[in-house]
Amino acid sequence: MNVMIIGSGGREYSIGRALKEDVNVDKLYFAPGNGATESLGENVGIEDYHALATFAKEKNIEFTIVGPEGPLVDGVVDIFKAKGLAIFGPSKQAAQLEGSKVYMKNFLAKYNIPTAAYIETDQIDRAFKFIDTLSTPIVVKADGLCAGKGVIIAASHDEAKKAVSEMLSGKSFGDAGLKVIIEEFLDGYELSMFAICDGDDFVLLQAAQDHKRLLDGDQGPNTGGMGAYAPTPLVNEEIYEKVKARVIRPTLEGMKKEGAPFEGVLFIGIMVVKGEPITLEFNVRFGDPECEILMPLLKSSVFDLFYKAATSQLDTLKVEFYDKYAVGIVMASKEYPYASSTPAEIVVDEIHHQELLKNSHISYAGVTRTDGVLYATGGRVLVCVGLGESIQEARDRAYLLCGQVHFAGKKLRTDIAYQALRA
């Protein structure tokens, strides 16, 4: 079967890398892809979704997988389905679970899914009054899509009010911040959970932990993610079962009642507080870099998982995982996340150590190929992934691989998975 992946980041590269080895897949297409995805398949430079659907018809592309949130919120799934094409991802209406934080929080409240106390407002006076009732720190979120950066954790009431003022004025996030969520800060530990859904049934993947802050020790500004590991030992079977019963199941039932059955990836940001999982947020696609570590842990066919979810057949699928751990280290460009960086040539040393060759790989993200040479041109350039029998072994291999990758100005955290290793 010919398969197309929509997107251009490390998430899409890692899905493509998994599908490249799948017996069900004949040829891969990426729209638009990046400088490294062309080694896995064919890059397609068509931006209009209607034209892309027509291209899929012409090239006999029988299945499409959507990586990023933007096309989902814009309705690419509806466009493809209207042409009779199989596609993995939620409809435009269902994608509002990520497209609007206000919609998402009100949905959680309506269906009694545990979440933090909050208000949603576009009125600065109402926002300030609610802020004054909260203890610090205080969470302020822009309503719309902000590429994973629309959340401010304010250390003081004044900082929270400043964040609200800048969002509502359009200064911080433009139109995405013209309505805000203000909520209580939950004190616990954060998890990323991913349910593959077909509207009725779901498969819950192994829980991961992401590292959002730029610097070691979770210091510095929030980023799109500087590294991740899975599965995390901070989750036991009891927490998995609580998430299934209290979050995923009522979400699927609620979305059906809303007339928007949820198909695709439901990314649940969870805060575990005194053993109880509380929902921080929903996204409607894989996290990045979580996707890069979850794909190599799937023993079952990645194609089968996505295709059966897109065609309402998850109840026929038994999913297996490797009994291993994966750690992913993001290598970012010099000025990330503050500004664009000068393109820099990427050099990867030849690896002679067989264990490292077998148990590590690179998922490329912000890269461009010019005259056969790969350049770092994005903020988050690539992810070095290590696999192992323990988190420590996987982490060591990931960092060994980082040592083989060179480009001017590269930056990375040196403490990914520290929470698990000190636990």
Image: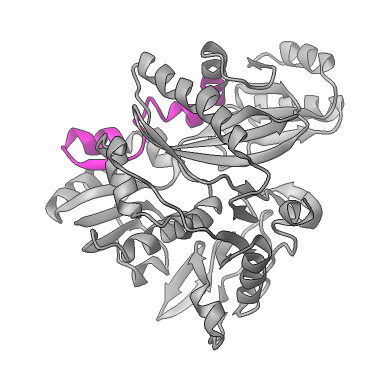
Q: Position of residue 186 (x, y in %)?
A: 75, 28
Question: 58 or 279, which lies in front?
Answer: 279
Q: Is residue 60 left or right of residue 382?
A: left
From this viewpoint, is residue 124 visible?
yes
Q: Quadrant of residue 70?
A: top left
Question: 26 or 420, which lies in front?
Answer: 420
Quarter of the picture containing the N terminus is bottom left
Q: Position of residue 87 (x, y in %)?
A: 27, 42
Q: Quadrant of residue 369?
A: bottom left
Vertical position of residue 162 compared to residue 358: above or below: above
Q: Which residues are magenta?
A: 77-104
Q: Is residue 83 magenta?
A: yes
Q: Position of residue 147 (x, y in %)?
A: 56, 43
Q: Is residue 322 magenta?
A: no
Q: Is residue 257 left or right of residue 111?
A: left
Vertical position of residue 62 compared to residue 162: above or below: below
Identify the residue at image location x=32%, y=65%: 20
Identify the residue at image location x=14%, y=48%: 57
Question: 304 or 403, which lies in front?
Answer: 304
Q: Position of residue 62 (x, y in %)?
A: 18, 49
Question: 282 or 417, which lies in front?
Answer: 417
From this viewpoint, is residue 341 visible?
no
